[in-house]
Amino acid sequence: MPATSMEELVSLCKRRGFIFQGSEIYGGLQGFYDYGPLGVELKNNIKAAWWRSNVYERDDMEGLDSSIIMHRLVLRHSGHEATFSDPMVDNKKNNKRYRLDHLVKDQKEGVIARVAAEIGEDASNFPAVVAALIKNPAKASEALKTAGVRDAFSGEVGDWTEPRPFNMMFKTTIGPVADEESYGYLRPETAQGIFTNFKNVVDSTSRRLPFGIAQIGKAFRNEITPRNFIFRVRELEQMEIEFFCTPGTDEDWHAHWLEKRLSWWEAQGVPRSKIEILDVPPEDLAHYSKRTYDLMYDYPTLGHEEIEGIANRSDYDLGSHTKSQAELGIQARVEENNDSVAKLTIPHPETNKPIVPFVIEPSAGVDRALLAVLSEAFTKETLENGNERIVLKLRPHLAPIKVAVIPLARNKPELVDLARKIKSELQALGLGRILLEDSGNIGKAYRRHDEVGTPYCVTVDFDTIGQNEGEGNADLKDTVTVRDRDTLRQERIKISELSGWIQAKLR
Ligand code: GAP
C-alpha cells in the first residue's frame, strides 16, 4: 500500500538521506531543498528514465541544455513579465503575505461559503470565487474581513489588503555596472531556452516537421507561499518537451503525448488509476495555452494535484519571439516592437513555405515526480513473525542503490576484501550505484536497504570463504547469499555467476 501521509514520506526522506531543508544550519530557507546521497541518485534515475524514453527511444527528438539566466527581453516577449503572477494579499495586522487562493482554500468550510456569498459566487465553484475576488479588489478586501478569513500564522481574523498580482520571476543583476537594463531573469520555465534555440537546433540538425526538443533543468519561481515539502518550491527542476508540428495536426499530437506520458508514469510505478486528467477550463489556461491537460496525481495528504501539464501552446512562443510578425500573419503579443532578430520559422512539409509551427508541450516537475514515485513505492508490511517493516518497492531502474554487498563481519579482512572485489565487479556492469555496506550488523543493513529500496543485498559470509566447517558447507564455498527486497527470498548464487544473474534481474 502506498504512503498514506506526507509526514511518513518527509520523515523517511530526512532519516535516510533523500532530502534536507536548504540552508538548514542557518534556520532553513523556505521553498528550497537539498537532495542528499540517496535523493540525488533517485532524482538522476528519474531524469535518465525520462530522457531515455523521450529522446533515445524516439526518432523525432533532440536534446538541449540552455542557460538558466536569460535576457530580460526573452521573458518580456514570452509574456511572463506581464502575466506570470499570482494574486497576493497582505494582512495589515502582522504584515504576513499570502497567495489569495491558498489563503481562502485553507479556511474552514463555513468561512469559504461566507467569502463566496460576500463576492456573489457559488461556493462549490472555487476557481470562480477566486476569479471574482481578483476582479473586484476593493470588494474582495471587505469580503475577506467580513467573512472572517483568518491568518494562518496568528490564527486571528486578518485586516486584508486588496488582492494584487505578484510577479513570480527572480530578477538578477548582470555584470558589475548597475544600469536600468543590466538585469536578466532566472528562467521560470525551461521552455523559453528551447524556443530561443529553435533556429539553432533546426539549422544544426536539418530537422523537418514534426520533431521535438527535450530539456531537463532548473526553473525558479518566487512562490508567495511555498509549501507541502518539495511539492511547491521556489527552485524546481522541470523535464520539458516542446514538440513542433504543422498547424492543424496539433490536436492529434496533443492526444499522442497525453497517451505517451500516461504510459511513462505507469512505467515509473505511478499507475493511471491514481492520475486524473483535468481538461483545464478556458478561464484557467496559462496566457500561452490553446488547451491544456493537467495530470493530477493523488498525493498523500494533498489529494489530487498537478504533477504534469500537457499544453497546446499553438504558435504563441515562436511567434512572439519572431521579428516581422505581421509578415507571417501573426498578431504581435506585446505592444512595443519586437526586439528579436530572428524569424523562428521552418518550411511547411508540403508547401515548403516558411511557417511558424505549433507546439505541444508535456512539462513535468522532477520534484513532484520524485514525491509521487516515493509515495507509490512506500510500503508498510507485517512479516510472518509479526514484525513490521517499511520497504520502498521502487522499480529497479529507479532504485538509488542497485545492490548492497555486505561482508558478514567487518573485522574479517578475508570477508571485507572479497566483498570489495565483488562490489567492483558489479559496479563495472554500469547498472548504477553498487554499495559496499560494511556496517557489520546484517539485520540493520537489511532494514536500511529495505527502507531505501535496494532491490538486492549480497552477503559474503564464512561459507563463501570456506571457513564454516559444518556438514555440506563445502558446497557453499565461492557462493554468496542474495536477498530479494520484495519477496525476502534468499538464494545461494555462485560468485562466478553473480554478474550475469544480477544483470538479468536488473535489466
Ligand atoms: N513550461 C510550462 C510550465 O512551466 P507549469 O504547469 O507552470 O507549466 C510544469 O509547470 C510543471 O512544473 C508542473 O506540472 C509541476 O510538476 C512543476 N512545477 C511547477 N511549479 C512548481 C513548484 N513551485 N514547485 C515544484 N514543481 C513545480
Image (cartoon, helix red, strand yellow):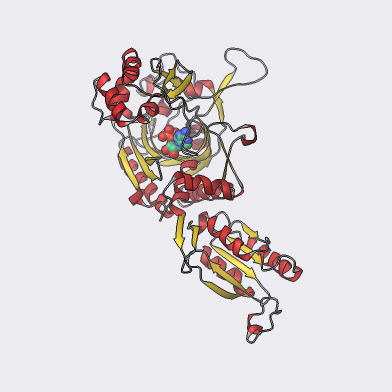
Q: Is 417 on the left or on the right of 340, as rendered? A: right
Please name the residue shown 52% across and 64% down the image: 485
Q: Position of residue 178 (x, y in %)?
A: 63, 14
Who is closer to the viewer here, 390 or 433?
A: 390
Q: Position of residue 417 (x, y in %)?
A: 73, 67
Q: Is residue 324 above or below residue 240?
A: above
Q: Position of residue 53 (x, y in %)?
A: 46, 51
Instruction: Place residue 406 in its image quadrant.
Output: bottom right
The N terminus sits in image quarter: bottom left
Q: Position of residue 205 (x, y in %)?
A: 51, 41
Please name the residue shown 43% across and 54% down the image: 269
Look at the image and tell me whether residue 184 can be seen. yes
Look at the image and tell me whether residue 283 can be seen. no
Please name the residue shown 67% across and 68% down the image: 408
Please name the residue shown 34% across and 21% down the image: 148
Q: Is residue 43 above or below residue 380?
A: above
Who is closer to the viewer here, 507 or 270?
A: 270
